Image (spheres, rainbow, N blue to C red):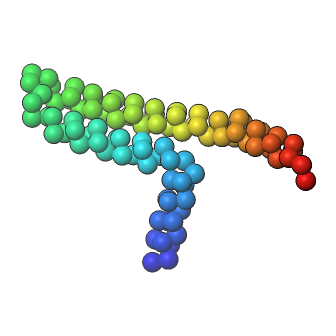
């Protein structure tokens, strides 16, 4: 039971560090759910083509969320921190 709690707290800690991971997961689930509901009205499209489109859309959303997350963390690391450090260095003691 304690390992479960540790994993759960690890997930929330990681989600706070990089908020785009849960966004990517939620988007993936939303796209797959939407495309599965829309499967009834796919018309003449083959099942395999419909599933491929669903997979590509979901993967595209996840990759986009990961890219935005990496850019955000790069911004925090290379632009926001040096500005904070510079402001601390120029403050009178």
Residue at horizontal 62 percent and vertical 40 percent from the top: 73
Residue at horizontal 43 percent and vertical 48 percent from the top: 22
Q: Is residue 17 above or below residue 62?
A: below
Taking the view exactly as shown, the residue that stands out farthest to the front is 92
Q: Nearer the viewer, residue 65 or 87?
A: 87
Please provide percent x and percent y for residue 54. Answer: 27, 32
Residue at horizontal 66 percent and vertical 40 percent from the top: 76
Q: In this view, does 88 lie above or below 31?
A: below
Residue at horizontal 50 percent and vertical 37 percent from the top: 66
Q: Is residue 2 above or below residue 85?
A: below
Please provide percent x and percent y for residue 75. Answer: 65, 35
How many discs appear? 0
Q: Is residue 23 above or below residue 67?
A: below
Please provide percent x and percent y for residue 61. Answer: 39, 34
Q: Nearer the viewer, residue 91 or 55?
A: 91
- 1 sits to left or right of 50: right
- 75 sits to left or right of 43: right
- 75 sits to left or right of 63: right
Please provide percent x and percent y for residue 28. Answer: 34, 41
Quarter that holds the N terminus: bottom left
């Amino acid at each position: 039971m304690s390992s479960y709690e540790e994993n759960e707290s690890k997930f929330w800690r990681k989600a706070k560090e990089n908020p785009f991971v849960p966004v990517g997961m939620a988007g993936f689930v939303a796209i797959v759910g939407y495309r599965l509901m829309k499967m009834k009205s796919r018309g003449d499209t083959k099942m395999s083509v419909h599933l491929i489109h669903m997979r590509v859309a979901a993967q595209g959303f996840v990759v986009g969320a990961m890219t935005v997350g990496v850019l955000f963390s790069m911004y925090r690391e290379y632009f926001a921190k040096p500005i904070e450090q510079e402001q601390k260095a120029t403050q009178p003691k």
